[in-house]
Image (tube, rainbow, N blue to C red):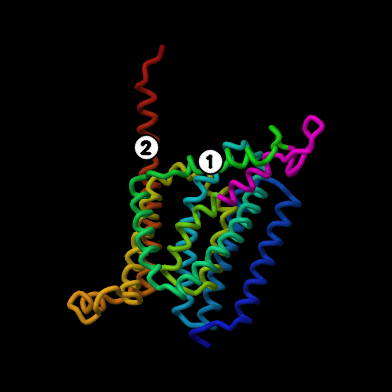
Amino acid sequence: MGGTLSVQFEVITLAVLVAILVVDLILVVKRPHIPSVKECLGWVGFYVALALVFAAVLFFFAGGQIAGEFVAGWLTEYSLSVDNLFVFLVIMSRFAVPKKYQQEVLMVGIIIALIARALFILVGAAVIDRFAGVFYLFAIFLLWTAWQQVKGEGDEDDGESFIMRSLKKLIPVSNEYDGNKLRTVENGKKVFTPMLLVFLVIGLTDVMFAVDSIPAIFGITQSAFIVFTANLFALMGLRQLYFLLGGLMDRLVYLHYGLAAILAFIGVKLLIHAAHEAPFWSESSGFGRFVHSIPEIPIWLSLSVIIGSMAIATIASLVRAPQVASAGRDEDDDTPTA
């Protein structure tokens, strides 16, 4: 009762979580609709409670360290997933997806992303086992990504446009939706509907985000099982969070600063870990002794930074948003009329 998890526990856990995802998908496909705020709150609350229950189970079976790693990893992935929602909103708008089918689009896209992330995690875990120095690369990449977040510069729009253009060249697509069908008949020919493109773009876009998030969570834990379950729980609540936060996304103006703080912190954490695991200098030198005197960052500090960064960014955004809206109204009032 502590330290490690049995293979049986991991297999049963994954089977149960995948079953929950399948049931969720079936419900969405059978009853496409626009979810109410009450429904979204209920599902988000359910998945958050489920993650916390899972953390408690981990604490009972494997101890506080593993449970803490899961919670920190889950919160990191959940925070980074909120950033994904901005892009999802843009994609849905560009494809003019009918609102009642958006749940289905998100669910299928999330499943595609989950399969792709599982492959990322397996490859990442294998590389880490054989080459501890990869943590230096992860750390540098996360610090660079954090700097990009601070600058507010991203290539998401260019990335989406490239994906869409490439897919349209490869796949014959109709101009109109045909309900939630993937295939339809146009001018006597069978073609795919834009729904297929949306599925693929959502899934591939989320895979692009995984390039940031997977190294980030490997900075918290090297357990492939914990990494995957943290990703699974973060993606589980993403569909409902999309509808719940849809009206708030424009108000979260400082969100990228919170994400930058998290990524930068984990980058530094990875550098310290790499220096302990794969030093490329003499450990007996003065510099070597100095580096090894720096302790590894404990999980409680990681949790505090993750929660604190997102809380400060969210509160600051919500306080700032009314001021921005008021300034916008004042500018409109000052605009001369013809």
* Residue 248 x, y percent position in the rendering: 48, 45
Residue at the image point whose x is 65% and y is 49% from the top: 103
Q: Residues within 10 Å of mark 1 (few under 14, many from 20)?
A: few
Range covered by the magenta-colored residues: 178-204
Q: Earlier in the sequence, mark 1 or mark 2?
A: 1
* Residue 234 x, y percent position in the rendering: 54, 61
- Residue 63 as seen in the image, left or right of residue 99: left
Instruction: Tell me the amino acid under the disc marked 1.
Output: Phe
**Nearer to the camera, 327 or 158:** 158
**Looking at this rendering, what residue extends furthest in the top direction?**
338
Q: Which mark is residue 162?
A: 1
* Residue 53 x, y percent position in the rendering: 56, 72
Relative to residue 108, is residue 274 depicted above or below?
Answer: below
Q: Residue 188 magenta-drawn?
A: yes
Relative to residue 25, is residue 56 depicted above or below?
Answer: below
* Residue 168 x, y percent position in the rendering: 63, 38
Residue at the image point whose x is 56% and y is 61% from the top: 117
Residue placed under numbered mark 2 in the picture: 324
Name the quarter where the C terminus is drawn.
top left
Residue at the image point whose x is 63% and y is 82% from the top: 8
Callout 1: SS: helix
- Residue 129 as seen in the image, left or right of residue 178: left
Q: Residues within 10 Å of mark 2 (few under 14, many from 20)?
A: few
Residue at the image point whose x is 50% and y is 43% from the top: 159
> Can I make out residue 68 in this image?
no
